[in-house]
Image (tube, helix red, strand yellow):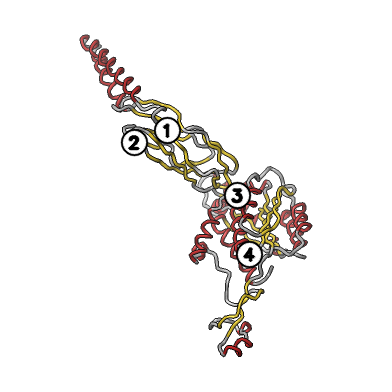
């Protein structure tokens, strides 16, 4: 029933109320109420129903966690139809709009932001159709259920590719790898430019051509880059709208994509109290899909992470020197000491790099000015967590471990820049 119908029914009800004082109005009011009710019922029956209204939902079968994923409702209906649509979207996703209005045929698009990875199912689309007089309504369901898979957010990979094609990676905070003459593998001999170091001048080519020539080297390729993803208890802690594990996945995927793009081999080891997934380091475009498929079922659990089990597996399986990027979280000195021991063993052949996700909310609370008793308690807890974590990270660095600790916003560009710098210095 619409507001117009309520207003129409209110008039005879007022007449009936006045009939308490003037008896002649009582009968008139009842007659008017009956007429209004019949009009509403007729209008409801005249509203387009499921036979006249067809709704089709269009959306990718693969959603990205933490990103706004578009969903389009395409409607075929009479041009006079007035419709209100509500999609039965998964409850775990945040919708940009709950209701969508439409007059006649057309399309309406809204977005859904998933908060967790895994499979989710849409129900039907609920439709409210209004009659031609704007009095009655008709409710029914349309469309078909749809199951989608929520995966890691690869929007950063798409942005990286777009900016790389335009030569604008600086907008992402990434410094480009190539500098004239730097690297370990011969690429070409070219005419020297003013900023070429003297050690790269090719005197033989200079004598032959009569022009100052330089040797250009490129970074070595086909080197393994392995992301070790911890999905133990600590990685299930929230850092903004996503968990630390989800942020780690996003950063790891961008790192591995850049490695593949550079010509290196990208691999994966996931672990909690033991190794839970592995992807052998390979090159090629299909490798990113293999990595996504391996990551998809992983969720942080309520178990302590076992660095020894995971990194021993890496040492046994990976004989060739590799960059081992360990995505984890450190909260105390005991954890730091255990990780130092494993990184010391890794350094005999590999280059370990520890990556941790900082939660800016904890830092903000620790530095806030409390006004209530509850805020004083929250600040004390946050300050203790922040201090213990900072102490553990200092211990890691003092133990010779290379560490990147950043919030989710700056983590990916800092990690990619570190990788590119290692490539530039031929540290792998």
- Give the image quarter of residue 121: top right
Q: Nearer the viewer, residue 219 or 383?
A: 219
Give the mark, 1 or 2, whose residue is nearer the N terminus.
1
- Sequence-wise, the earlier of marks 3 and 4 is 3
Q: Marks 1 and 2, how far apart in space?
A: 13 Å
* Residues at marks 3 and 4, CA–CA distance in whole angstroms: 26 Å
Question: Which tag, 1 or 3, sits closer to the chain's start?
Answer: 1
Residue 44 is at least partly visible in this image = yes
Which corner quadrant of the image does residue 6 belong to? top left
Find disc 3 in the rendering and name its residue.
246
Q: Quadrant of residue 77?
A: top left
Q: Are marks 3 and 4 in contact (CB under 8 Å)?
A: no
Distance from disc 1 to disc 3, alpha carbons, whole Å, reads 38 Å
Crowd tier of the residue under label 3, counting other residues whose Cα lies within 10 Å: few below 14, some 14–19, many 20 or above: many
Secondary structure state at the residue bearing disc 3: helix
In front: mark 1 or mark 3? 1
Viewer-side label of 1, 2: 1
The residue to which callout 1 is attached is 54
Q: CA distance from mark 1 to mark 4?
A: 49 Å
- Give SS at disc 1: strand
Of badges 3 and 4, nearer the viewer stands 4
For marks 1 and 4, give the one nearer the viewer.
Answer: 1
């Amino acid at each position: 029933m619409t507001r117009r119908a309520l207003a129409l029914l209110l008039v005879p009800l007022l007449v009936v109320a006045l009939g308490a004082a003037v008896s002649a109005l009582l009968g008139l009011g009842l007659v008017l109420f009956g007429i209004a009710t019949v009009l509403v019922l007729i209008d409801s029956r005249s509203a387009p129903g499921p036979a006249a209204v067809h709704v089709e939902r269009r959306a990718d079968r693969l959603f990205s966690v933490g990103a706004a994923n578009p969903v389009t409702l395409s409607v075929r209906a009479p041009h006079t139809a007035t419709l209100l649509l509500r999609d039965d979207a998964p409850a775990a996703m945040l919708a940009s709009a709950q209701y969508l209005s439409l007059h006649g045929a057309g399309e309406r698009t809204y977005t859904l932001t998933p908060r967790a990875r895994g499979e989710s199912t849409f129900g039907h689309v609920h439709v409210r159709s209004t009659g031609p007089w704007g009095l009655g309504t008709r409710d029914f369901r349309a469309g078909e259920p749809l199951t989608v898979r929520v995966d890691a957010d690869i929007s950063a990979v798409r942005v990286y590719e777009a900016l790389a094609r335009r030569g604008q990676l600086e907008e992402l905070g990434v410094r480009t790898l190539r500098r004239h003459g730097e690297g370990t593998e011969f690429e070409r001999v070219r005419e020297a430019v003013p900023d070429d170091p003297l050690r790269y001048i090719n005197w033989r080519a200079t004598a032959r051509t009569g022009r100052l020539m330089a040797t250009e080297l490129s970074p070595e390729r086909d080197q393994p880059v392995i992301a070790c993803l911890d999905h133990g208890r600590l990685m299930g802690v929230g850092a903004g709208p996503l968990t630390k594990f989800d942020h780690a996945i996003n950063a790891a995927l961008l790192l591995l994509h850049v490695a593949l793009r550079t010509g290196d081999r990208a691999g994966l080891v996931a672990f909690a109290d033991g190794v839970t997934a592995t992807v052998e380091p390979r090159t090629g475009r299909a490798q990113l899909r293999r990595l996504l498929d391996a990551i998809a079922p992983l969720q942080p659990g309520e178990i302590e992470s076992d660095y020894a089990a995971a990194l021993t597996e890496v040492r046994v399986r990976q004989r060739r020197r590799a960059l081992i990027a360990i995505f984890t979280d450190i909260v105390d000195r005991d954890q730091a000491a255990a990780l130092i021991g494993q990184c010391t063993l890794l350094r005999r052949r590999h280059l370990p790099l520890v990556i941790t996700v900082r939660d800016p909310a904890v830092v903000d609370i620790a530095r806030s000015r409390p006004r209530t008793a509850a805020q004083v308690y929250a600040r004390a807890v946050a300050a203790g967590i922040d201090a213990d974590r900072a102490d553990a990270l200092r211990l890691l660095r003092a133990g010779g471990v290379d560490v990147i600790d950043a919030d989710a916003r700056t983590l990916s560009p800092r990690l990619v820049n570190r990788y590119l710098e290692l490539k530039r210095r031929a540290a792998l």
